[in-house]
Image (cartoon, grey):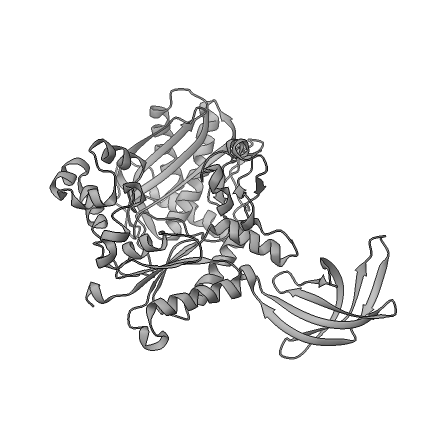
């Protein structure tokens, strides 16, 4: 199918966590709609996860940003209402959204908990004009599920995603290739998908401030500055993107990180935290039948300074113990003794785990595998906390840290369309 | 009618197809005592799933303290809890 003939919808829930919480409260007899007052969903302050996770639209004049601390948000707006997150509710809302969308197309990709791509190509036969259909879908979601969405329509996923971001809430936007000049190019360059903070900074230094500036830049120059990423963002700025709406998503990397409730000041506790993170990562790797070749460790200290360190392994592995040993080595090389508040472990370069290159220099891998398999089986059958390492007893650390939801697969934001 | 959303103890009957009908319920009063109300008539029944949370909503009629009253009962499927929503 020619790219220009495709019709792709991007459905984005408006202030997802907050409106889901608001609807849930209204359904349970609350008379106040959180969406109509300055309110935020915030993490647990006592566990030092006190940041803004989602905000209502009335917080806009106070300039509250997602990710800032609840303390500074409260300074900006003293009457701010803070509600705790409820991840199970979000999963439930997300599933209900998907189940409605599935009625409109067989080809759906859940991009994150609150974003869905829907391939509407050839669906005109059943549902009529795409724009009218989008309006109907939007109204139906509002009526049945109680929350509002933005729908972006275009020929590819990138433009559809940019379109749904144009003006919020409760709107349908189109951004077809002939509309890029009017609707997308005047936007600041950091609004473009895949242009993050550091890329924005570098682009600004080169005098590129809008998406239009970027689109007009010679891609050869961008390739020199940013390597392949330069080519990618130039294509995005010109609306070039043609990935399919995919159901099964290729996993590029797998990681896990957590903010600890207290500052870690000694090596032993840090290693223990790494073990706890590695447990979850390795288990998830084994679950998708992959082995990782590259392991990286990320730390953030009390002053919010962060750094990371990575290493390529001789052989890809998914054994908890081996990954843990490497993580400890990396950590020891990285850490300068500063008190830490946040640690992360991430694996990339994933390979299928159906064979393993044996080596004279390695410990007996078969025994490790048998051990991991046994532990996984016990945990799957009796719950993740049915078997834990004894070093976590009285350690104030959870034996398996990170991951917002332990029981269910929680779709996270991805950098790949 | 006033919004209460008060959890109640319920006796209900279910058809073979799994369709519930409220029969009699017990509700705690502000002073801590209980009042038992027999559901005289179920007038309407509809389903909603706001926030992806399915609930069955009944409009019912009973005689409470000698006065005939109209009220709304909700059954939350996920938790199997019954509520008096509005009375």
Residue A273 in picture, x, y percent from top left: 46, 33
Left or right of residue A46: residue A359: left
Q: Residue furthest right?
A: B66
- Seen from the viewer's position, the closer of residues A78 and A342 is A78
Q: Residue furthest bottom?
A: B16
Residue A198 in picture, x, y percent from top left: 29, 34
Up/down of B21 relative to A361, above or below: below
Residue A368 picture quarter: top left
Question: If the image is split into quadrants, where does the C terminus of chain B sit?
Answer: bottom right
Left or right of residue A284: residue B37: right
Up/down of B10 relative to A76, above or below: below
Q: Residue placed at 70% from the left, 76% from the top? A: B43
Q: Residue furthest top?
A: A337
Residue A84 in picture, x, y percent from top left: 57, 43
Q: Residue placed at 46% from the left, 65% from the top? A: A139
- Seen from the viewer's position, the closer of residues A169 and A376 is A169
Up/down of B68 relative to A244, above or below: below
- Seen from the viewer's position, the closer of residues A252 and A231 is A231
Residue A13 visible to an observer of this rendering: yes
Residue A56 visible to an observer of this rendering: no
């Amino acid at each position: 199918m020619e790219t220009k003939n495709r019709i792709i919808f991007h459905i984005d829930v408006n202030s997802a966590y907050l409106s889901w919480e608001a609807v849930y409260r209204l359904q349970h007899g609350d008379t106040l709609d959180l969406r109509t007052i300055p309110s935020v969903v915030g993490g647990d302050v006592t566990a030092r996860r006190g940041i803004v996770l989602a905000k209502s639209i009335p917080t806009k004049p106070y300039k509250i940003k997602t990710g800032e601390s609840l303390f500074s948000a409260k300074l900006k707006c003293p009457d701010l209402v803070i509600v705790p997150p409820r991840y199970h509710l979000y999963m439930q809302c997300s599933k209900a959204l998907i189940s409605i969308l599935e009625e409109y197309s067989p080809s759906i990709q859940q991009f994150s908990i609150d974003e869905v791509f829907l391939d509407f190509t050839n669906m005109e036969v059943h549902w009529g004009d795409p724009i009218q259909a989008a309006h109907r879908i939007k109204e139906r979601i509002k009526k049945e599920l109680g929350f509002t969405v933005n729908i972006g329509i275009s020929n590819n996923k990138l433009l559809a995603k940019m379109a749904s971001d144009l003006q919020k809430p409760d709107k349908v936007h189109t951004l077809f290739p002939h509309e890029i000049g009017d609707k997308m190019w005047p936007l600041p360059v950091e609004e473009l998908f895949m242009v993050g903070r550091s890329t924005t900074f570098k682009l600004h230094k080169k005098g590129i401030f809008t998406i239009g500036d970027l689109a007009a830049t010679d891609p050869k120059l961008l390739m020199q500055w940013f390597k392949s990423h330069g080519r990618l963002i130039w294509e995005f700025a010109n609306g070039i993107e043609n990935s399919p709406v995919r159901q099964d998503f290729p996993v590029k990397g797998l990681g896990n990180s957590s903010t600890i409730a207290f500052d870690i000041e000694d090596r032993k506790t840090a290693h223990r935290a790494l073990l706890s993170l590695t447990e979850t990562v390795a288990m998830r790797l084994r679950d998708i039948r992959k082995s990782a070749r590259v392991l990286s460790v990320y730390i953030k200290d009390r002053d919010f300074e962060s750094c990371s360190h990575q290493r390529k392994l001789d052989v890809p592995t998914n054994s908890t113990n081996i990954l843990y040993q490497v993580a400890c080595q990396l950590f020891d090389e990285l850490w300068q003794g500063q008190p830490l508040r946040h640690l992360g472990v991430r694996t990339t370069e994933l390979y299928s785990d159906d064979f393993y290159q044996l080596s004279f220099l390695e410990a007996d891998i078969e025994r490790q595998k048998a051990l991991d398999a046994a532990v996984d089986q016990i945990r799957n059958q009796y719950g993740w906390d049915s078997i834990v390492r004894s070093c976590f007893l009285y350690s104030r650390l959870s034996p398996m840290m990170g991951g917002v939801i332990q029981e269910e697969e929680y779709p996270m934001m991805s950098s790949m369309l | 009618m006033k919004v209460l959303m008060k959890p109640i103890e319920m006796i209900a009957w279910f058809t073979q197809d799994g369709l519930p009908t409220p029969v009699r319920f017990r509700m705690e009063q502000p002073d801590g005592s209980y009042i038992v109300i027999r559901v005289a008539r179920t007038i309407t029944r509809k389903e909603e799933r706001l926030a992806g949370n399915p609930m069955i909503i009944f409009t019912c009629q009973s005689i409470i303290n000698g006065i005939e009253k109209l009220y709304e009962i909700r059954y939350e499927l996920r938790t199997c809890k019954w509520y008096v929503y509005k009375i």
